[in-house]
Amino acid sequence: MAVYTEVSDEALVAYLAEYDLGSLVAFRGIAEGVENSNFSLRTTTGDFILTLYERRVDPVELPWFLGLMEHLAERGISCPLPVKARDGAALRQLCGRHAAITTFLPGIWPRRVRPEHCAPLGTALAALHEAGADYAPTRPNALGPSSWAPLLARCLPDADAIWPGLGTELERAHARILATWPNSLPIGHIHADLFPDNVFFLDGRLSGLIDFYFAATDILAYDIAVCINAWCFEPDISLNVTRARALLAAYGATRPLLAAERSALPALCQGAALRFALTRVFDWINTPAGAMVTRKDPMPYIRRLRFHLTAQNEHAYGL
Amino acid sequence: MAVYTEVSDEALVAYLAEYDLGSLVAFRGIAEGVENSNFSLRTTTGDFILTLYERRVDPVELPWFLGLMEHLAERGISCPLPVKARDGAALRQLCGRHAAITTFLPGIWPRRVRPEHCAPLGTALAALHEAGADYAPTRPNALGPSSWAPLLARCLPDADAIWPGLGTELERAHARILATWPNSLPIGHIHADLFPDNVFFLDGRLSGLIDFYFAATDILAYDIAVCINAWCFEPDISLNVTRARALLAAYGATRPLLAAERSALPALCQGAALRFALTRVFDWINTPAGAMVTRKDPMPYIRRLRFHLTAQNEHAYGL
């Protein structure tokens, strides 16, 4: 479910009148996505995505996200380009929400990941990191390591209701990960949520990256760790080393990894698994039973975390 | 939420290979609709809707629905036209579901009904009825008057939990409506669910009718009664006679109403209100609290029913 706000036809027509995009042809809610309301919008001049920003996105940060997308798109990254209205502003108001129109990207996200997806993913991720290097504004990662302790504290009282012993397991993992967390790796703008449903492919080639609303300024290689977690595990939560190797090799061919980045991979993968485990545990505990949002099972990320905690070094990932 | 079945990219590409529609360009789940999974599909030859049929639709009836849409589209009704694959069949299988591709209709459904919508609606409904006249196969209305008694019986044990006295109120209304139900009005193929979200408008003109999966062979004027209920009430559940008059006048200009049809309007409107009240009460009682489906409040239809039970004759609707 990804339409939280209904847009009346009158409001939409009035909104579109602020742009040079021609007149309305079609408008449909998009089912994918969980954070914002997304609509596919066709006008007489082309296809676009209309996004109404809901809950988790802080409006103060929207200019940073839209600026990053514009910066990346100008440098050839295939990502949604915010479309400016006649007054030059891309970020506007619609139905009491902040709203923006972005370009439509062709492609389909892979429902079933295959090894052939992982090299294009690695190339695109490295290109994203390089293209972002000269985007000057920064955004601290609101779900980075410093967020994990308070998030964990809010999960602990109910964590064992999900799985006996889960609270203690998360506490121990958290302490161990923070103790070994790398502090001198290259920093840049990361996507931070590059799951398969945010990556489009067309005719076997990567055609677009979407949903930059978790993007932040953080350790570049952490973005690789997020992708290893999201793309390189089998349904039984065993690591598919072929995929991880393809991802890492393709990334390194565009932006060679430092030795320190390679050796930090186990810690970064542990941290990425913990980050998604914590938000899923939190959402699991705090999503009312009747809510319209699908709760994501946290256990697959707990099990990834366990795997990464056993990784001795980067060779565990095929390096 | 209207994507119940995930379609893998491989399955989709294999499915499309059975058609002469070119290759895949984009694929997004559509948020609207509650009965089936709908996707907007773009290929190198155009835009289409892919529907996977879920639960309430009986697969045995799908050829009737698709045949009706094809029949209507050939006669100039702007409705989805089922697209045939190379083997000539429009109804196929995908991901363990019956599936079909239909043409894409431009337009936007009116989130807020205005009187100007109601004349085009009446014209389109009459044109739909006329165009369907020579579609020979018939389908009994599974939600017609004979279905109301068993549906009511299943609602009664829990109806009073929604509203004290609701069970008795529904029983009395049901008995009265059946006693006065017209039995010699013109019959034909009706849409039977022509709510605003099934009617698209573009530049002030009606551009399409969608979602024919409640269509059936029943009293033609009953379809008008469904529309009066769905389009002609204010938020406070008072009848907007201006809208009803516009709807009826425009309908009658294309397909003149018989005196018997006009005088049956109160009974037909009562029946239509009861039909939606009953299914909503049933769904309200039987939807688990954690389900991903929005339960629709039955009370607005109970209140419409009360209004129609007070209507002395067709003049109550502006005739």
Image (cartoon, coloured by chain):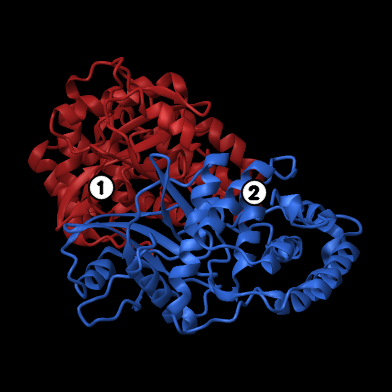
Chain colours: A blue, B red
Coordinates of residue A268 in the picture (x, y in percent): 71, 65
Question: Which residue is under mark 2?
Answer: A244
Q: Residues within 10 Å of mark 1 (few under 14, many from 20)?
A: some
Which residue is nearer to you in this view: A138 or B14?
A: A138
Q: Which mark is residue B313?
A: 1
Coordinates of residue B279 in the picture (x, y in percent): 50, 42
From this viewpoint, is residue B59 visible? yes
Instruction: Note whether A32 is above or below B64 in the view shown.
Output: below
Q: Is residue A36 left or right of residue A81?
A: right
Which residue is nearer to you in this view: A204 or A141?
A: A204
Task: Indicate the amino acid at tag 2.
Answer: Ala
Q: Is residue B95 left or right of residue A95?
A: right
Task: State whether discs 2 and 1 lie on one chain.
Answer: no
Coordinates of residue B178 in the picture (x, y in percent): 42, 33
Instruction: Note whether B58 is above or below A86 in the view shown.
Output: above
Q: Is residue B243 left or right of residue A280?
A: left
From this viewpoint, is residue A96 visible? no
Which of discs 2 and 1 lies nearer the camera? The answer is: 2
Which residue is nearer to you in this view: B290 or B140?
A: B290
- Secondary element under disc 2, as helix, strand or loop, is helix
Coordinates of residue A48 in the picture (x, y in percent): 30, 59
Marked residue chain, label 1: B
At x 23% / y 51%, what residue is drawn?
Answer: B107
Calculate the distance from the C-alpha at mark 2 to the C-alpha at mark 1.
Answer: 73 Å
Q: Quadrant of residue A219?
A: bottom right
Task: Indicate the amino acid at tag 1.
Answer: Asn
